[in-house]
């Protein structure tokens, strides 16, 4: 049985960490050699980005084509192991390209830091005391990051919410081209003693909120009926109505949106967990529902819209430290967090359109499983040219399973394939 007690593991060089973990977990020589090889190129970078690193888990980096956002063509790097995700963006973007592509608008990049105040006898009086000292709170927050202020960002407002039995302060901060977590967390911690002084309470939690509803991005696109078919327009409208009426369907609807957004977020070194948390929390306000909406235009075309939080950055963290993330931003031409956020919202909308079109026509499995067949072939042990041959054979048989792939692989030499 594996013993998880490995004292001092974080102090060891990466190679020695791998040795200890391999011994504790009983990894064979082949598994260990694979992990060593996987870290050969980016292992040193990984060491500085995470803890107890033993190797690097590579994720395919694809590029979606055909997308136009606000009148400009854009190539979109997407890090995902699900091949249908990239294909969906390519196809959906092509279908709306001649109608103008995707048009977006975005809020200023404002994040929220929450400060929880406990032990208050009079919540209303404490709230009034905080609001009366707004200018002093602003000065203390801005003193945390003079560079941000010089770049045009910084403190924008303070709100005081009574959430019995607590008083909850919201610091609204413009974080410019950063995601902003470190910035707003520092400000929240810095003003905590001052908040205790003016309220007479005790500060508990002081941390950002991932419900970044002051940092929304909206995108819209038109898919002409003459391109996608009038029946497809009606089918997508029906599929969206299902999501609007049923949270069970809405969860899967929104997961499809995040397939695209997360892939771009991962490729650019952004926090995909924050993106997911914010999107689903936003979708749950007033009852969980779809992040996108669809309607038929007077001309009979399909108009799609999306609105969701997009807390992303192009400076700080892995975005700045990882050369692949920097290359991805260069490929995309995203020189500001605003542009990155707009492209990501556009990708989410186009991804959603493609998923709904598949559901409303042939069903999701035909295209998805055709692409998935290659993964199954690899899992069965196929290599090189064998992968596509076995994948095609499984698709033709309508049986995309690992045991089928193994059988085909065993038969391949005898059939001279």
Image (cartoon, rainbow, N blue to C red):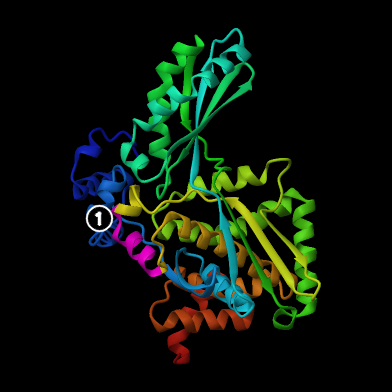
Residue 140 visible in the shown view: yes
Image quarter in which the N terminus is found:
top left
Instruction: Tell me the quarter of the picture where residue 229 sits.
Output: bottom right
Disc 1 target residue? 43
Name the foreground residue: 11 vs 205. 205
Name the foreground residue: 26 vs 143. 143
Q: Is residue 187 above or below residue 147?
A: above
Question: What is the x, y in percent for residue 160?
Answer: 57, 24
Residue 201 visible in the shown view: no
Which stretch appears magenta?
Answer: 321-331
Please give left or right for residue 259 compared with residue 193 in the image.
right
Q: Is residue 85 above or below residue 212?
A: below
Crowd tier of the residue under label 1, counting other residues whose Cα lies within 10 Å: few below 14, some 14–19, many 20 or above: some
**Number of residue marks:** 1
Name the foreground residue: 41 vs 37. 41
Name the foreground residue: 97 vs 258. 97
Please give left or right for residue 73 compared with residue 56 in the image.
right
Image quarter in which the C terminus is found:
bottom left
Question: What is the x, y in percent for residue 192?
Answer: 42, 20
């Amino acid at each position: 049985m594996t013993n998880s007690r490995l004292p001092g593991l974080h102090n060891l060089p990466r190679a020695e960490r791998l040795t200890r973990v391999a011994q504790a977990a009983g990894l064979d020589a082949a598994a260990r050699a694979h992990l060593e090889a996987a870290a050969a190129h980016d292992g040193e970078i990984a060491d500085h980005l995470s803890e107890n690193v033993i190797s690097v888990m590579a994720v395919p980096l694809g590029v979606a084509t055909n997308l136009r956002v606000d009148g400009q063509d854009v190539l979109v790097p997407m890090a995902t192991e699900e091949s249908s995700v990239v294909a969906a963006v390519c196809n959906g973007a092509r279908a709306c390209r001649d109608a103008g592509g995707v048009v977006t608008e975005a809020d200023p990049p404002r994040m929220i830091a929450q400060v929880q105040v406990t032990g208050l006898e009079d919540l209303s009086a404490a709230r009034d005391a905080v609001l009366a000292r707004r200018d002093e709170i602003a000065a203390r927050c801005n003193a945390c990051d003079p560079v941000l202020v010089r770049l045009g960002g910084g403190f924008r407002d303070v709100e005081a919410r009574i959430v019995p039995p607590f008083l909850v302060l919201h610091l609204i901060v413009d974080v410019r081209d950063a995601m902003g977590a470190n910035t707003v967390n520092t400000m929240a911690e810095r003003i905590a003693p001052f908040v205790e002084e003016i309220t007479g309470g005790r500060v508990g939690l002081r941390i950002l909120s991932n419900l970044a509803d002051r940092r929304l991005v909206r995108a819209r696109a038109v898919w002409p009926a003459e391109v996608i078919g009038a029946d497809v327009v009606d089918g997508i409208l029906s599929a969206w109505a299902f999501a609007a009426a049923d949270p069970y369907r809405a969860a899967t609807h929104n997961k499809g949106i995040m397939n695209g957004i997360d892939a771009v977020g991962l490729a650019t070194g952004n926090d995909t967990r924050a993106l997911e948390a914010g999107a689903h929390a936003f979708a749950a306000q007033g009852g969980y529902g779809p992040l996108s909406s669809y309607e038929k235009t007077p001309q009979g075309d399909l108009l799609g819209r999306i609105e969701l939080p997009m807390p992303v950055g192009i400076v700080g963290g892995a975005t700045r430290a990882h050369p692949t993330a920097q290359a991805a931003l260069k490929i995309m031409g995203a020189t500001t967090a605003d542009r990155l956020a707009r492209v990501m919202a556009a990708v989410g909308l186009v991804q959603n359109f493609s998923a709904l079109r598949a559901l409303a026509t042939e069903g999701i499995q035909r295209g998805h499983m055709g692409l998935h067949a290659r993964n199954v072939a690899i899992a069965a042990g196929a290599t090189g040219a064998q992968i596509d041959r076995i994948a095609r054979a499984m698709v033709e048989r309508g049986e995309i399973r690992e045991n089928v792939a193994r059988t085909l692989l065993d038969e391949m030499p005898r059939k001279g394939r």
